[in-house]
Amino acid sequence: MNIFCKRLAEQRKMNNMTQREVAQKLGIAQPSYIRYENGKAEPTIENLIKLADVFDVSIDFLCGRKEY
């Protein structure tokens, strides 16, 4: 989960987005998204797909299975 949290925060910052903006795109509350970045919660499969779409990366990348 650690690499997921790191990549999630990195992608959000690289895309100049706030935690609130990402949460809105997912349709969840900001505190719920913050828990994803802090490693205190895991996204549903549906939200994992949405995160990959928002940042235009693969799920494998977000989860640390690929380096690109």
Image (tube, helix red, strand yellow):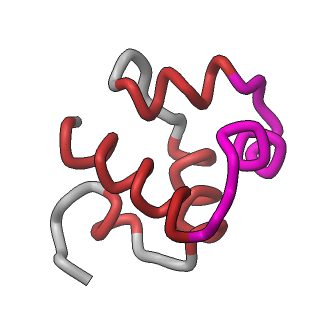
Most extreme residue toward the bottom is 68
Which quarter shows the N terminus? top left
Q: Would residue 33 appear left or right of 23 to someone viewing this image?
A: left
Write the residue at 19% across / 60% down.
64
On screen, residue 29 above or below 64: above
The image quadrant that residue 67 belongs to is: bottom left
Q: Nearer the viewer, residue 45 or 20?
A: 20
The image quadrant that residue 17 belongs to is: bottom right
Q: Nearer the viewer, residue 33 or 12?
A: 12
Q: Would residue 26 appear left or right of 6 to someone viewing this image?
A: right
On screen, residue 67 above or below 10: below
Write the residue at 33% across / 55% down.
7
Q: Nearer the viewer, residue 17 or 5?
A: 17
On screen, residue 42 above or below 25: above
Q: Position of residue 68 (x, y in %)?
A: 26, 83
Write the residue at 50% across / 35% down.
43
Q: Position of residue 21 (x, y in %)?
A: 78, 47
Q: Position of residue 52 (x, y in %)?
A: 53, 65
Q: Position of residue 15 (x, y in %)?
A: 60, 69
Is 34 within the magenta? Answer: no
Magenta-colored span? 15-30
Is 17 within the magenta? Answer: yes
Write the residue at 64% across / 58% down.
50
Q: Would residue 20 appear left or right of 64 to someone viewing this image?
A: right
